[in-house]
Image (cartoon, helix red, strand yellow):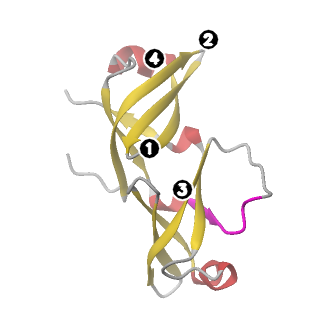
Amino acid sequence: MKVSARNVFKGTISKLQAGAVNAEVDIALGGGDKLVAIVTMESVKTLELTAGKDVVALVKAPWVMLMTDSHDIRLSARNCLSGTVKSVEPGAVNAEVTLVLPGGTEISSVVTKEAVAELGLKPGVAATAVIKSSNVILGVSA
């Protein structure tokens, strides 16, 4: 599978909580890292999602927000994934920042160069990736 999303995570559904319209899907990424997705009940049925099923989670890098000094901030976003900056690749306007989570999962984000400077993002700095669960797209093998 070839996709344009920078973040392609392979994982296993650890929990699926069905609702009337949507379902919350917890995905174990390995090494203790996890991601939460919100999908429609139609997607649950079409993709045959159940606990224990292997899935691929896609997240476009511009959908990944970054923050530092997050210890006293609470957000409604289901995915607040703390890690360490691995690399910063500056461009003309934006930069691609890659974080490494404690379990080894890497997450790429595209943010402005101004945000990189304001947050002091550089290799070794602690940062948190913030991803809305509705921005996680799930896929399964055919």
Rendering coords of residue 93 (x, y %): 53, 83
Q: Nearer the viewer, mark 1 or mark 2?
A: 1
Which quadrant would the N terminus be assigned to in this image? top left
The numbered dot on residue 20 is 2
In what element is the residue under mark 4? helix
Magenta stretch: includes residue 101: no
Amino acid type at circle 4 is Glu
Could you tell which of marks 3 and 2 lies nearer the N-terminus?
Answer: 2
Q: Provide the residue designation for mark 1.
A: 32
Q: CA distance from mark 3 to mark 4?
A: 23 Å
> Between residues 8 and 86, which one lies in front from this camera angle?
86
Q: CA distance from mark 1 to mark 2?
A: 29 Å
| As drawn, 14 above or below 127 | above
Q: CA distance from mark 3 to mark 1?
A: 22 Å
Q: Provide the residue designation for mark 4.
A: 42
> Between residues 80 and 84, which one lies in front from this camera angle?
84
